[in-house]
Amino acid sequence: KQEVTQIPAALSVPEGENLVLNCSFTDSAIYNLQWFRQDPGKGLTSLLLIQSSQREQTSGRLNASLDKSSGRSTLYIAASQPGDSATYLCAVVGRTSGTYKYIFGTGTRLKVLA
Amino acid sequence: KAGVTQTPRYLIKTRGQQVTLSCSPISGHRSVSWYQQTPGQGLQFLFEYFSETQRNKGNFPGRFSGRQFSNSRSEMNVSTLELGDSALYLCASSLGDRLSSYEQYFGPGTRLTVT
């Protein structure tokens, strides 16, 4: 059974710091991995999607890497800003009993201090 | 391009009642998925519809059901509500017919409170 873990659960950093969020999954047979951010009381905003054949994706100050063999993905945020404060979630798509399923991690709550 | 919309945004129901939530996907998107988010269980996949057919289903009881219309709009129904059904229900749409290929775009959610 696929399990997705995110460490740390919460993180507080001063503005301007570069930081790394971690996502681990137990079953390496995934089709893709997607990173999201969620602001309090709101829906999810897609940040980056990495296909299983890719190693990394970049968008602006964000860079996500994927290592399927070790069951890990990292989200790197450069020069953090207070506006980056949110909960960050990773989700993997895998196939179980013939059906595709999105399995979400527990999230990392990030606070960037001005 | 308009994003995913969900109605209503907030809902209060009593135990034993039923509820219907609505989701309108991004124009051109044919796949709609539903998720339940609670503080204790996090985000859990309910089901996915594509071209009016349910293609994937999570591990939820039969009280949770859904459907998709020809215009890709989707509804989710929960019958015989329980206190534990209180949650944020999120809908997501994507372009393609394979979850493996396309990004999911989420709506703002419907906050359901069962009293």
Image (cartoon, coloured by chain):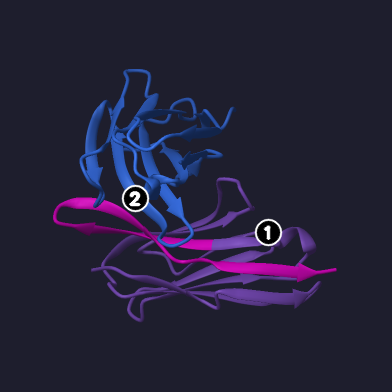
Chain colours: A purple, B blue
**Does the magenta segment cover residue A113?**
yes
Which quadrant: the N terminus of chain B? top right
Instruction: Output the chain of dot 1.
Output: A
**Does the magenta segment cover residue A88?**
no
Kindly identify which numbered label has been placed on residue A13.
Answer: none
Say if A88 sits above or below B73 in the image. below
The one of B58 and A48 positioned closer to us in this rendering? B58
* Left or right: where A19 falls relative to B51: right
Q: Main secondary structure of the magenta part?
A: strand
For badge 2, the amino acid type reads Phe
For badge 1, the amino acid type reads Gly
Q: Position of residue A14 (x, y in %)?
A: 80, 76
Q: Which residues are magenta?
A: A89-114
* Left or right: where A29 falls relative to B38: left
Q: Residue furthest right?
A: A114
Element marked by disc 1:
loop
Kindly identify which numbered label has been placed on residue B45.
Answer: 2
**C-alpha separation, residue under disc 1 versus residue under disc 2:** 29 Å
- Residue at image location 22% in from the left, 57% down from the top: A95
Element marked by disc 2:
strand
* Left or right: where A61 falls relative to B50: right
Kindly identify which numbered label has been placed on residue A60.
Answer: 1
Q: Position of residue B115 (x, y in %)?
A: 46, 41
- Residue at image location 15% in from the left, 52% down from the top: A98
Question: Are tags 1 and 2 found on a single chain?
Answer: no
